[in-house]
Image (spheres, grey):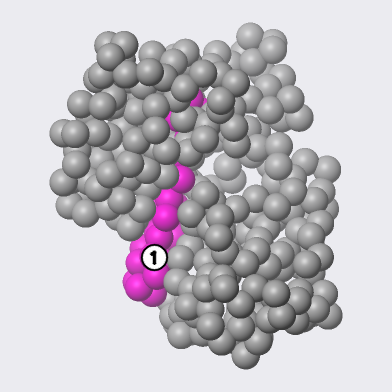
Amino acid sequence: MHYEGNIIRPPSEANSIILQVTVGCSHNKCTFCGAYKGVRFHIKDAATIDADLSFAARYCKKQKRVFLADGDALIIPTARLMEIFSSIRQNLPWVNRISLYGNTKSILRKTVAELKGLKELGLDRVYMGLESGHGPTLNKIRKGVTIEQMVEAARLVRDATLFLSVTVLLGIAGAAQSALHARETGLVLTKMQPNQIAALTLMLLENTPLYEDARAGAFQLPDQALLLEELRILVESINLRRVQFQANHASNYLPISGRLARDKDRILGIIADGLDGRLHLKAEYQRAL
């Protein structure tokens, strides 16, 4: 397989065939993300993608899923995406699910009909980064879109009957705005109505503007207790009847997984045990992105 730069994928795609169709991120301005700094975003050429599909056809027959990397495969024009999906179906007929990252701007460039067309060719899951439902925080981290645009993008994915997984980032608002960030993020998630919510915890990376802000004292990363309190407020603020909730990423101090609203009391009980010291929290050296 021909891989360029950092290959980032969701934890749930660990056993998928990773087919890199773009390099980098089409936005690449978020202050917290260092994954693609210094990388020029581009769509990979057809010959390289075809060669990778030929490799997968020979060596990846036991893997039933495909994840299209990198940071925003959905920005590829729909006609070209449909060609790629058709090639996957032709070369890897045993694959039963295709997933990808889709940022808000890229989703909004698609119509529901286009998204449904991709679904007919195998697209099953779209991973979308909300990070925060707190407007001032979104502006500070240079997400490049508004809350209203994110809610609309989520609606498009839902209307196309695709599985929507939304990521939020604990700690991204800093210590001062921690509670407000958590509460408003829960309210926005309720509006977005995703199938899955993944809560990660911010880790400051040296090649990012947010790291420099922290060094200069302009950003204060919440401590463990405040991050757990943030998680508690987030869960309390989500009002959805059925959504998979996961805070079990390697970056989190207290791994949690369950379904809301069914497991809401249990999850809040686990967080309370963590806050009161009855549960062991992950050591700093055990955390990772």
Which quadrant of the rendered structure holds the C terminus? top right
Residue 216 appears in the picture as rendered? yes
Residue 150 horizontal/vertical position (percent) = 44, 52
Q: Quadrant of residue 78?
A: bottom right
Which structural element holds mark 1? strand
Look at 51% across and 18% down and name the residue there: 283
> What is the total number of numbered labels drawn onto the structure image?
1
Look at 39% across and 65% down and name the residue there: 163
Look at 22% across and 29% down and name the residue there: 268
Look at 47% across and 13% down and name the residue there: 223
Q: Is residue 253 above or below residue 109?
A: above
User: What amino acid does circle 1 point to?
Assistant: Phe
Residue 85 horizontal/vertical position (percent) = 60, 81
- Quick check: 288 left or right of 168? right
Which segment is the magenta one? 149-172
Which quadrant of the rendered structure holds the N terminus? bottom right
Residue 27 appears in the picture as rendered? no
- Quick check: 201 left or right of 59? left
Residue 228 horizontal/vertical position (percent) = 36, 21
- Quick check: 26 left or right of 173? right
Q: Quadrant of residue 277?
A: top left
Say which of 76 and 279 sits in front.
279
Residue 55 horizontal/vertical position (percent) = 75, 76
Question: Circle 1 sits on which residue?
Answer: 163
Q: Is residue 108 above or below residue 46?
A: above
| Residue 166 painted magenta | yes
How packed is label 1: few (under 14 Cα within 10 Å), some, or many (20 or more)?
Answer: some
| Residue 139 painted magenta | no
Specify the farthest residue to the bottom.
90
Say which of 132 and 146 sits in front.
132
